[in-house]
Amino acid sequence: MVQQPIYENDAKNIIKRFVKNHQVHVCDFVIIDDISKLNFIYETNSWLSEKKLVIKPDQCIKGRGLAGLVGLDFNWNQVCTWVESYFGKSHKVGKAEGILNRFIVEPFIEHKKMDEHFLCIFSDKDSDNILYSSQGGIDIGDVNLHSVAINFKINEKPDINKINELVSSKTSSQYSSILIPFIADVLQVFRDLHFTYLEFNPIIVVPYSSSLYIVDIAAKIDSCAEFVCAQKWQLCQYPPVFGRGLTQSELHILDLDSKSGASLKFTILNKNGRIWTMVAGGGASVAFSDTICDLGFSHELANYGEYSGAPTHDETYEYAITIMKLMVLSPKHSLGKILLIGGGIANFTNVATTFKGIIKALRKMSEKLIEHSVTVYVRRGGPNYEEGLKNISDACIELKLPVFVFGIDVHMTSMVAMALGVVPIANTMEFSVSDTLSLPSKSVMNISSSITSNGTSFDTITEVNETLFTNSTTSIIWGFQEVAIQGMLDFDYLCKRKTPSVSCMVYPFRASFISKFYFGLNEIFIPIFGSFEEATTKFPQASVLINFASMRSSYEISSEALNFPQFKLLSIFAEGIPERFTQMVNARAKEIGVTVIGPASIGGIKPGSFRIGHAGGIINNIFFSKLYRPGSVAYVTRSGGMSNELNNILARTTDGVYEGIHLGGDRYPGSSFMDHINRFNEDPNVELIVILGEVGGLEEYQVCSALMSKKIKKTLIAWCIGTCSSYFDTNIQFGHANAC
């Protein structure tokens, strides 16, 4: 989910179309974004010569009035003079400085100061919140000091009586009688059209004419709901952040991202910087940037970016070539330049495949990269990572590009320190004739027979009431996901489960079929049903629903699944589900006591018992991270890719993982850090709790409060990524919707 600011004129058009209240007025307005068209605008809008006017920038700038950027009670000639004095010129508002190039002109409404009111509607995880003050306008100050608030739960129907109590407590009936129906109407529009933020300051209420005028709006919408609301929004434009227009390269990556099922993010921080990053994974990309900044090189960091979600060969090539072209556009550096091609241990992305696009870009740009003294550092893990690392190493050696390649035995932040010269460069990977350690399913039997348990014995595990998974937990999969299911079955066999953890699939497009899989060396057949009703009737013991539906249909599938009481856990894989839909699923699940993992989550894993989909990665990663048997360390993470880093670190430094949960990268995951920490806190099998959080959310503060109040009795280690944001001059949307 991305909260996307929209232009004021777009917000006003939406309110005008959907708030059907004769007392509410959205005045005519014109947009000036080309100073040469002033005469045309005047000639085609007769009201401009008939009324007093207001002019202000429409570039999502907060505090326009206090910054002196609002012209009031003007005639058209004064508007033209005002525009000519500001248009195309740089202006500083707060910390941001940018070019003023878009203005909105509308009628000036005669009113008294007491007619100005303030209204704000915004969402949090569980509710929609209304903040109201009878004091509005430019000099409102700290609105929290003189406002009142109410909230409505996500699935709660707005109560007009509650709104009445809110408004009537702050203003007289001559105003409240007009404001109350407006607030009820606009709250419904907020919900139906997937707004995430709406602020009106001021609203002008004129009692003698029983009229309410919408004068100023700041609005954000959920851009992931475009497939639901595009016609209603009528192609709202997404303005650039004031003070930071997007470059052609950034626009190119943004366009690639919009057309891809993968995630592609790119922001230029310092075009003359010598350290460039190309990192796979939302969490890993932030950890790389954190490390660069923490080591004192923030002033040399050229970009932030990430690619994830298994981009295609062509998408990876376009992403890589864009970065490399920018590297050689800037002046040469006496110390040379650094290209960090990094990432965590992937769960399902084929590293060798994505590296093909990077290698193609290196071949095309090699001469220029050598000319600019670029050294390449590579660190990656995951499916076919050894093949990918070998290929990129061979290509760089052939091209005479200096390269250092590292595998999962070197922590990714260690590679950054080596690249920056902070620590000596360790031994790089040596490659054998064999391309990869990837193991076919039939090899699981051989691995299983060689396992020795150095962790907690299965016999010593104490069953607790709050556990999500046991070694008898079974699931139903929505979607035809052969690779994920085979991975779950391989894990089952490696853990010496007696029965498979997958009961069946639900997929209407292949209903009444069966699909062949391997459970160790034995072939098994898993049925495919057309509905949940058929599947749950046949397999009433399955307590986990793993939803692999796309972001367009995931809400409907999840909502339907919650009608079947046997499901105690719902795991949602899709990223980019509209926030309102996620909130509604979460609210319903909470009502009936169902745990939700996700959205945008790879799920979770309980070594020796059960794993969801791709959690834990490919089978050799399961083996090397000792996820086939339980340890005593439980973790919760915001990042799916970083979950395998945690598995790897914990396997090397402790007796291993007891349980790992990936909350999900979207802003409102179904469960929280504290939901799982509370379980771990009461589980006698857990000795240490680890969390990986990130900037932008509130749940990390809840953990801090629980620690301070001594509610958490066990040792807890926390790693919060995103500290690099304090070094940046502009807000950056990191790889996860929650992190900015």
Image: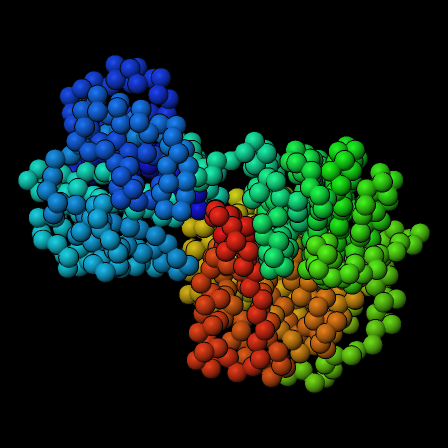
Q: Give the percent coordinates (x, y) of residue 685.
A: 63, 82
What residue is shown at x 69% (from left), y 35% (from top)?
Answer: 328
Q: Give the percent coordinates (x, y) of residue 82.
A: 27, 27
Foreground of the two, 359 or 387: 359
Q: Quadrant of residue 679?
A: bottom right
What residue is shown at x 54% (from left), y 79% (from top)?
Answer: 681
The answer, for residue 96, to whether it is visible in the render is yes
Q: Quadrant of residue 203?
A: top left
Residue that extends furthest to the left in the rendered view of this protein: 208
| Side (left or right) of 731 relative to 457 | left
What residue is shown at x 11% (from left), y 39% (from top)?
Answer: 111
Q: Give the percent coordinates (x, y) of residue 355.
A: 76, 44
Q: Give the percent coordinates (x, y) of residue 321.
A: 69, 35
The answer, for residue 161, to whether it is visible in the render is no
What residue is shown at x 88% (from left), y 51% (from top)?
Answer: 435
Residue that extends furthest to the right in the rendered view of this protein: 433
Look at the picture and state if 523 lies above or below 329: below
